Amino acid sequence: MIVFKNKEEFENFFSNIKTKKIDNYLEFKKFDNYEENKILIVAPHACKGKYLLNIKGKNMLIPGGEKNVAELTKIASYNVGCALLISYVPRFEADFARGIEDLGKGLVLNFLVGGKRIPIKIHTNKKYLNLLKKFHKIIEKINPSFILSFHGTFIRNFDALFGFGKEKRFISGKKLAFKFRREVVKKMKEMKEDVKVGIAKKIYVGRSEYILNTHIKGNRRGVLIEFARKGRAPFPSIKYQILATVIAETAKNYCAK
């Protein structure tokens, strides 16, 4: 397992790894062991930086995505030999975890800005329709057995929350959901890393996560992962790099045969 002390180390390492760039906004790569484990990690909200938006007459700097989820996706994918699919489109332009049919309909999401929740329209720009369709075509083309959807949020009491969908359907039920969580925590303890991982109950369950709700079918399984910001910024901590890798490694045991 490879981990990085800082952003410079990370960028130097991955600058030597070729990935496929699609229309400047998507990044795709199948690492060597993908055909053996068939695990795909997606990061639909990896846009970097902040954008100046006019919200109710006020100019506000709004983050276009979730900080350093792309970095965690690349580290885990490399370590385990997964495929990765990353979107760098700002969420207010097109949210790649939302439905194709909802693009341009003015969905609203509360963004945390200056300690307050501000409702902002997302998924607004229809010019990204073809790119959104390409994103989903890639998923079906490579035919993963397990999909991990990496996200980031502000949570205080956990390092990560796992969303298994309504009635835990993303992983074939409650029994396997709790088993998956236990195995991740056990592996982290074996690596001398104390981690707090929970199972989402109300929010972060994945009810509106279009990727998993659309592509989890038949024998395919998946999990939505919400990483706490405290371990993602300014660069993912060693613990979070290990956690992302352990999650992907654990997923190999849950690929339905």
Image (cartoon, helix red, strand yellow):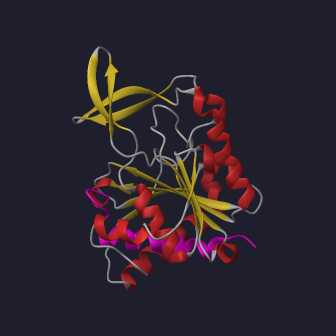
Residue 101 vs 247, above or below: the answer is above
Q: Is residue 218 left or right of residue 53?
A: right
| Residue 112 image-quadrant placement | top left
Q: Is residue 112 left or right of residue 93?
A: left
Residue 16 vs 199, above or below: the answer is below
x and y, in percent, of residue 69 in the image: 42, 56
**Residue shown at the point (59%, 34%) measured from the top left:** 128
x and y, in percent, of residue 137 in the image: 71, 49
Residue with the most extreme top position: 57
Q: Quadrant of the N terminus?
A: bottom left
Which of 27/98 is in front?
27
Residue with the most extreme left position: 114
Which of 219/126 is in front?
126
* Visible residue check, residue 216: no
Q: Quadrant of the C terminus?
A: bottom right
**Residue shown at the point (22%, 36%) measured from the top left:** 115
**Residue shown at the point (56%, 64%) measured from the top left:** 177
Q: Is residue 127 left or right of residue 4?
A: right
x and y, in percent, of residue 168 in the image: 60, 56
Q: Is residue 2 magenta?
A: no
Which of 176/96 is in front?
96
x and y, in percent, of residue 2 in the image: 40, 79
Residue with the most extreme bottom position: 190
Q: Is most of the magenta stretch helix, strand or loop? A: helix
| Residue 47 image-quadrant placement | top left
* Visible residue check, residue 75: yes
Please report the bounds of the magenta region as a residue range. 232-257
Q: How many marks?
A: 0
Q: Is residue 233 magenta?
A: yes
